[in-house]
Image (cartoon, rainbow, N blue to C red):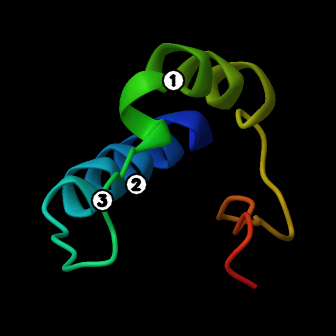
Amino acid sequence: MPVATHLITAASRLREAVDSLAFSPPVTHVYNPLDYAWKSHELYLKRFGNSKKKVIMLGMNPGGFV
């Protein structure tokens, strides 16, 4: 199975897990970039993730909550 397929499967599982998260106040808005930008992310993984890597970095910018 191509490496990109494994990455897409992992990202899809993460997308589903993040969708199930619930937050209490003061959080009023939550968005999942793996939902609204899924097509772009999947294309990126297919284009650049289709070879073996020594390291993979996952995550996103934490915004103002650092």
Q: Which residue is mark 1?
A: 37
Tag 3 residue: 28
Q: Give the quarter of the image for residue 61.
A: bottom right
From what the image shows, is residue 39 above or below residue 53?
Answer: above
SS for tag 1?
A: loop
Type of amino acid at the residue the image marks with label 3 = Thr
Q: Position of residue 21 (x, y in %)?
A: 19, 69
Whether residues under marks 3 and 1 lie with C-beta atoms below 8 angstroms apart, the answer is no
**Residue under circle 2?**
10
Real-space Cα distance between discs 1 and 2?
16 Å
Distance between the alpha carbons at the discs numbered 3 and 2: 28 Å
> Residue 10: x and y, percent?
40, 54
Q: CA distance from mark 3 to mark 1?
A: 21 Å
Observer-nearest of 44 and 49: 44
Amino acid identity at mark 2 = Ala
Foreground: disc 3 or disc 2:
3
